Image (spheres, rainbow, N blue to C red):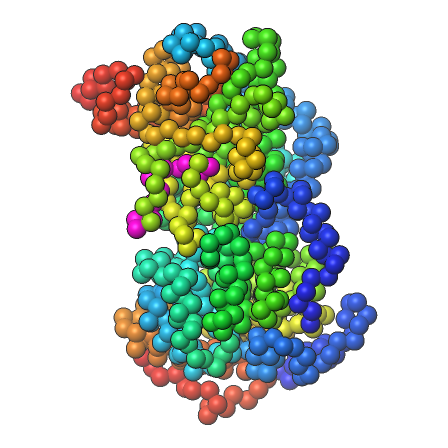
Amino acid sequence: MSDESRAERESRKTRTGSDGQERPVSDEIETDSDIETAIRENEPALITYITAGDPSLEDTKEYVEALDRGGSDLIELGLPFSEPIAEGPTIQAAINRALDAGTTPEGFFDLVDDLETEAPLLVMTYYNMILQYGDEADVRPFVERAAEAGLSGLIIPDLPAEEADPLREACDEHGLDLVFIVAPTTEGERLETIMSQVSGFAYVQARLGTTGARANVSGATHDSLTRLSEYDVPKAVGFGVSEGDHAAEIIEAGADGVIVGSALVDIIADSEETTEGVDRLEAKAAELKRGARRGAGEAVDAEDVPEPEQP
Amino acid sequence: MSKTTPDHDRDRNRERDSEATFGDYGGQYVPEALMPALQELEDAYERYVLNNEDGFMDEFRERMRDFGGRPTPLQRADRLSERYDREIYLKREDLVHGGAHKLNNALGQVLLAKYMGKERIIAETGAGQHGTATAMAAAHLDMPCEIYMGRTDINRQRPNVYRMRMNGAAVNPVTAGSGTLKEAINETMRDWATTVETTHYVIGSVVGPHPFPKMVRDFQAVISQEAREQIQDQAGRLPDTVVACAGGGSNTMGTFHEFVPDEDVDLVAVEAGGSSLEIDEEANLAPNSATLSTGTDGVLHGAMTKLLQSGDGQIVESHSVSAGLDYAGVGPELSHLVATDRVTPVSVDDDAALNGFHRLSNLEGIIPALESSHAIGYVEKYTDDLGDLVVVNVSGRGDKDLETVLEETEKRDLEAAPDVEVFEQ
Ligand SMILES: Cc1ncc(COP(=O)(O)O)c(C=O)c1O
């Protein structure tokens, strides 16, 4: 971590883009997107994920509130789908628990209706769940309901930009962000196209493969952030992040936010009681947020972020 | 920051749509990490398969002849013809090396992977026929190979598990869900998302994201290219009806492809009716795999197609006595051909399939795969719905199924079955 790298990043943000256009500096937020605002204002941002309905929707409500108190700037809620091909074993198991508990899209939306968090909420799910909501195979009813429930955006890991027109149009109409993933394999023209369509933030996939907590930060993360450095859009890195130190390293490497999922889902899975899970989630979020701020070269004030209580 | 798509991107998307889809079906619904690999595959498919660059198709045809045993015969089935009082011809894909049509595709894709400079092959398998074919092709072409197979399928298709191992492939058991083909595909996609830069995923049917459905169909189209010529030579005209079983639909598409423009030829896709055509939403189970007949539109494993799913969009577990048909999805092109009334979807239940198995075995001396037995079961049960000249695809041979057939036959009273108790001593 260093002030230098922070300064370098600031200067990158004012650089002329590849299209020859002057880019606005990041402090002037020119967006109507809750998500982008949440990231830019809280930079470095912490984005947390858990699966809705794991182990029940009532527990999810308490867990989300804990993540919010712990310092999450955005919260992704997974709406479980039976074939989660982009998830590793941890989230796959959480999805199975949620489905076994009878989690439905309606139950999910009722939960979101009930939640009052400071952090904006996004839904992460698979495309078939969007299509099937309502009577016909159509994306609109889901997007309408999501907007009504107060969600700020969607992340659909099996919907590449090439297939996204119908959903993007519906999201545009309702003012929701549709977040795209940038993988280590995304390069050249595809990268240009995706970056020109960024909505909310670019979800930078830290490594090839599926979700899952890892012990270290992948070299692919650094390569991806270097590749993306000329684009003035918020970039958040996910897939494998599990500790405050990872968060620090990722922010220092030039990300605007870190995304953590499996490490939180693991906490839920090992907690014997909801109260224990709530405490540990809040503490973990705080640890991650502190790590992120350390990575940004900020003096981490103990007053600012709650100290973890030892469970 | 702009949230609307620039016009030039929309045009590009529209142009691409016509190539990646069949009417409303198809597309590329996969994690972003796989998109460049699909692009690379599409380029290779165009260059090598469609344009025969570097003589790819010549080499493929030669290997299919010398290693694979093509062409396969179109055999007049004399006793079936007599029994059903019409001309019945069997396209003998059970005689392809490995015992099923699956080698047509597996050899094509492994060879293509080689041309593309890939270093490793992965595949999923249900009945084990595709896994076996892929393992054979990989051994033949000297490529390392790993196969994902559901636990349930490993238990009911053991001979094929042994064959894969004999041919040097690793077999990775998949325990999620009901341990069948759907779960095996999920796991193979996860592997591919991790290893995509060096690995080719040999998908086993006309399913998955573009360009797989088109490419697999093209490798399988040899079935109908041969059959169409053979029937004209042997019977002097085109058939009235062509019948093939449909799991993912690769032998179906292969058998139908050349006949699609022949509007007078009826194309009948026989699905697994299992024990019932109803979905049990409570149990999250379709006791059948009759996707074309009963499914609804949705996205699974990379494509928009017909699916067995709950009202909420969860994919339900399918069931069939035959592992190779036991899948909740189907190829997008078949969905399209059904939606446009070119292909008629029908189904027969487990009992009729087992009866078809015995019928072909004792009348013609051909022991068919339980998958193919659905096509025979349909011919037996719905004879009157067929024309005078019928081609039935026997997609594979049934050696792999003997244990299941004995076990299942004992539980039933089947007209065509021999006394199986003798095996129980
Ligand atoms: C002999 C045989 N026939 C048919 C099938 C069903 O697959 P498809 O519908 O793709 O031909 C299989 C699948 O394993 C098979 O082994």
Give the residues drawn in magenta, as a range: B282-292
Say which residue appears at 52% left-offset and 25% top-offset: B267
* Quadrant in which residue B41 is drawn: top right
Q: Nearer the viewer, residue A155 or A182?
A: A155
Q: Residue furthest right?
A: A20
Height in image: A311 above or below B225?
Answer: below
* Quadrant in which residue B159 is drawn: top left
Left or right position of B45 against B98: right
Q: Is residue B4 magenta?
A: no
Quadrant (top left, top right, bottom left, bottom right) of the C terminus of chain A: bottom left
Instruction: Tell me residue B407's x, y (percent).
Output: 25, 27
Say which residue appears at 50% left-offset and 55% top-offset: A131
Height in image: A243 above or below A178?
Answer: below
* Quadrant in which residue B43 is drawn: top right
Instruction: Tell me residue B89's x, y (percent).
Output: 49, 13
Instruction: Tell me residue A165's x, y (percent).
Output: 63, 57
Instruction: Tell me residue A148's x, y (percent).
Output: 49, 71
